[in-house]
Image (cartoon, rainbow, N blue to C red):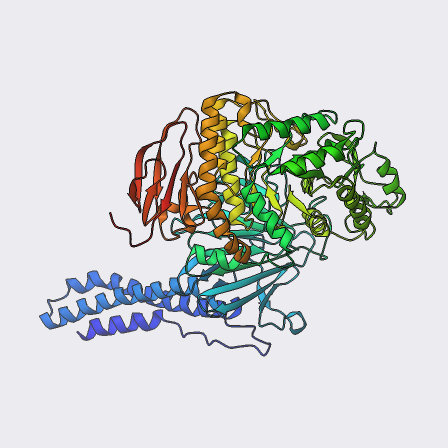
């Protein structure tokens, strides 16, 4: 016993070195959440682990010799077994503690709600229940070996923000605002070198959640979580050619109750990678979209908000009052756009394709149908001889004053399309150049107008909306039109950001090209307009945002559905969904094209497509026709159209007007995705081929050729079938639901106390 004990004690003492003392230098220690302290702690942990490992190794080497010795008493044997087990347990606990320390030592809680690791910049966002609802990595391009430190005093904000800096690379501000269950986190990056572009990436899916928002993009997927595209500048465009559509807003929402809203001054680029499960945002200037550097180096600023559920969060994030400054006439016009159709005069893509006779005859055909309200006659930009004349072409419209007077007496309203583009063939171009009213070439000292092309115009200048003289000049011409021809309102065809000259320069710096359309719209509010073709902010009512031009095809009708729902999500409650049957006809998809806006209107669509299209539009905020049902010369088409108009009058219009106030107060859409009815129902999230009107009507249209049945999902509640009048219990699927070609499936919600 003595020999064995001495052997064990001697080897143990030889194997253990004294622990090094941890000393702090006189220089300032930055914070316990950074690497200086971490390194010392890690060394101490490693020393402890090595000592225990050495001790265990000695025990194992001595074990064979020990068992050859004389048999010991049972009590001593049990003690040694116990000691060995304790060694194993100790090694395990120390190793586990070391790994845990190494993983979490740099992760700290800011404001008690942001879990942020300052070394690798992993972040976790917590909701009001302290549950992680979002995680990702900030500053993904910053080298992992770069060590952060707290900002110097003169770099800190006075609003309580945490400020962290990577020397010569980037500076990060984080802040938190707690409003009970509604909480917002602010992230603000400042690049500190010319080749540094702040990039933050967040997980694309968590707990089966889906991302929505941003408008529409190529291929028209319902959810951002199903898209794939590399970094692209976030700007309005033609979604057939560019990455995003004509309605944009820097707002993205996830189904588990978290949303991102990016500051409008950030030069925003987006990327979605479903393979890497990443949704990334980047700040980077370029030579067109974000050519105007609003800050010396790129800055990325946005806020992340969370609350109880997706619907509540959406209401809080998009809440905006649209009542401010509205007149009684504006409210009346808003009601007429819901109640009465918009009649778009068919035309080809030539200036002489429309004249006074075509306008008059079209109105006669509308009246002859006899079962539809008269509404608004929309005349394309070809009421002018040259785009930008802003005067009526008297050679094609010799007695337009008298014709408009007749149309007014019959109950029509007249709408002229106007554009900010002025053809180089117009007399106004010379006048505008002389007065320096046009956008000019960059670096030309306002001496050379910047030219572009749009639709039928191969060469045109663009009014500089930031020039204080441009708006009065244009308003004078438009007011003269209204006074002389009694035009009721205008439609603003603004193109998209990509229709501006590539090397554009305005008198005042624009944040990005989409600021142009916004300023143009706001400047002409007093003139009165029915709709706009492009927006980055909801236009003042009664103006509706039009959908992008849609191909006359079965894929086109599906695009209408996706577009209206996506635009409603990002805060555009009033949508003009294009002409029934499509805006252009194209057999094959083309990618090398200036714009699909330039294509002429289609010939008469096939009968089934027209019927299904009209069924869908019956439940939209507004109806727009180009081809008339009477053109088919079919009693079947006429009967279907009559029934749909009756459904719209009796059911749809009252609901649209009922939810109008809610849309005006909070920016909620009139036509909504199903998840706005029940955000906690997983089935509602993925359904992209049904929608609701307000909260009391569900529509399940047929969007495929030669299909007469479909799957229908009804959220919780009791619903009345619009086809046969039967009662349907909600919170379940209806399989193989029959929908004849002359019918559309819709369901009206009954009071909660309804019983079968």
Q: How many numbered discs sit on the rendered protein? A: 0
Q: Observer-nearest residue: 514 or 642?
A: 642
Residue under the point 50% across and 36% down: 617
Q: Observer-nearest residue: 87 or 285?
A: 285
Q: In the figure, is residue 317 to the left or right of 710?
A: right
Residue 74 % position (x, y): 9, 70
Residue under the point 50% across and 41% down: 620
Which image quarter holds the N terminus? bottom left
Residue 137 % position (x, y): 51, 55
Of all residues, the one furthest to the right in this rendering is 434
* Residue 121 appears in the figure: no
Q: In the figure, is residue 640 to the left or right of 454?
A: left
Asked if residue 318 is positioned above or below residue 600 in the image, the reply reads below
Q: Observer-nearest residue: 125 or 96?
A: 125
Residue under the point 36% across and 66% down: 97
Residue 316 % position (x, y): 50, 60
Asked if residue 105 is positioned above or below residue 447 in the image, the reply reads below
Of all residues, the one furthest to the bottom in this rendering is 26
Q: In the figure, is residue 256 to the left or right of 305?
A: left
Residue under the point 75% across and 31% down: 457
* Residue 679 appears in the figure: yes
Q: Observer-nearest residue: 341 or 452?
A: 341
Residue 655 % position (x, y): 46, 48
User: Which quadrant of the view contains residue 367?
Assistant: top right
């Amino acid at each position: 016993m003595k020999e064995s004990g001495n052997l064990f004690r001697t080897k143990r003492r030889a194997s253990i070195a004294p622990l090094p003392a941890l000393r702090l230098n006189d220089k300032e220690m930055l914070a316990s959440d950074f690497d200086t302290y971490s390194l010392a702690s890690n060394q101490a942990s490693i020393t402890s682990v090595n000592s225990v490992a050495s001790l265990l190794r000695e025990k194992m080497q001595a074990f064979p010799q020990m068992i050859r010795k004389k048999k010991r008493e049972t009590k001593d044997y049990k003690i040694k077994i116990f000691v060995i087990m304790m060694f194993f347990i100790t090694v395990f606990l120390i190793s586990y503690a070391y790994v845990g320390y190494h993983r979490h030592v740099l992760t700290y809680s800011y404001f008690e709600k942001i879990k942020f690791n300052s070394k690798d910049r992993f972040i976790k966002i917590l909701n009001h229940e302290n549950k992680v609802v979002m995680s990702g990595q900030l500053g993904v391009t910053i080298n992992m070996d770069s060590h952060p430190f707290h900002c110097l005093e003169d770099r800190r904000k006075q609003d309580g923000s945490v400020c962290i800096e990577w020397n010569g690379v980037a500076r990060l501000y984080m802040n938190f605002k707690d409003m009970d269950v509604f909480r917002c986190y602010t992230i603000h990056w400042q690049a500190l070198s010319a080749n540094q572009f702040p990039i933050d990436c967040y997980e694309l899916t968590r707990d089966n959640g889906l991302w929505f928002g941003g408008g529409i993009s190529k291929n028209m997927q319902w959810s951002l979580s199903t898209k794939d595209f590399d970094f692209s500048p976030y700007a309005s465009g033609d979604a057939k050619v560019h990455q995003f559509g004509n309605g944009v807003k820097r707002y993205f929402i996830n189904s588990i109750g978290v949303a991102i809203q990016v500051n409008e001054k950030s030069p925003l680029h987006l990327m979605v990678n479903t393979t890497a499960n990443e949704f990334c945002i980047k700040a980077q200037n370029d030579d067109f979209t974000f050519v105007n550097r609003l800050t010396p180096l790129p800055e990325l600023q946005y806020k992340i908000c969370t609350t109880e559920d997706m619907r509540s969060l959406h209401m809080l994030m998009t809440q905006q009052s649209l009542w401010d400054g509205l007149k009684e006439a504006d409210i009346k016009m808003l009601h007429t756009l819901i109640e009465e159709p918009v009649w778009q005069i068919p035309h080809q893509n030539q200036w002489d394709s429309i004249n006074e006779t075509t306008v008059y005859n079209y109105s006669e055909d509308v009246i002859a149908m006899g079962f539809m309200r008269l509404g608004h006659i929309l005349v394309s930009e070809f009421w002018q001889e040259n785009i930008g004349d802003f005067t009526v072409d008297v050679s094609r419209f010799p007695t337009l004053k008298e014709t408009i007077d007749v149309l007014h007496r019959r109950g029509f309203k007249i709408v002229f399309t106007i554009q900010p583009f002025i053809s180089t063939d117009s007399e106004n171009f010379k006048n505008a150049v002389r007065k320096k009213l046009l956008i000019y070439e960059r670096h030309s000292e306002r001496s050379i107008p910047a030219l572009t092309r749009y639709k039928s115009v191969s060469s045109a200048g663009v009014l500089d909306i930031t020039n204080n003289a441009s708006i009065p000049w244009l308003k004078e011409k438009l007011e003269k039109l209204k006074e002389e021809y009694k035009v009721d309102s205008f439609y603003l065809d603004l193109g998209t950001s990509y229709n501006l000259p590539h090397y554009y320069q305005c008198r005042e710096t624009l944040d990005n090209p989409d600021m142009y359309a916004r300023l143009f719209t706001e400047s002409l509010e007093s003139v009165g307009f029915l709709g706009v073709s492009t927006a980055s902010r909801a236009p003042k009512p009664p103006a509706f945002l039009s959908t992008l031009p849609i191909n006359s095809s079965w894929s086109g009708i599906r695009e209408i559905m996706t577009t209206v729902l996506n635009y409603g999500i990002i805060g555009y409650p009033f949508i003009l969904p294009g002409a029934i049957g499509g805006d252009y006809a194209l057999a094959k998809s083309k990618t090398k094209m200036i714009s699909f806006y330039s294509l002429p209107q289609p010939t008469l669509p096939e009968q089934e497509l027209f019927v299904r299209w009209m069924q869908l539009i019956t439940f939209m905020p507004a109806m727009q026709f180009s081809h008339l049902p009477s053109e088919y010369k079919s009693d079947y088409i006429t009967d279907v159209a009559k029934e749909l108009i009756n459904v719209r009058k009796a059911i749809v219009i009252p609901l649209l007007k009922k939810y109008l106030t809610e849309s005006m107060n909070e920016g909620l859409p009139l036509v909504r995705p199903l998840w706005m009815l029940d955000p906690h129902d997983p089935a509602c999230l993925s359904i992209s081929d049904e929608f609701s009107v307000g909260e009391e009507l569900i529509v399940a249209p047929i969007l495929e050729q030669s299909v007469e049945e479909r799957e229908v999902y009804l959220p919780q509640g009791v619903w009345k079938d619009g086809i046969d009048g039967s009662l349907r219990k909600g919170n379940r699927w209806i399989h193989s639901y029959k929908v004849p070609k002359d019918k559309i499936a819709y369901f009206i919600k009954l009071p909660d106390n309804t019983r079968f």
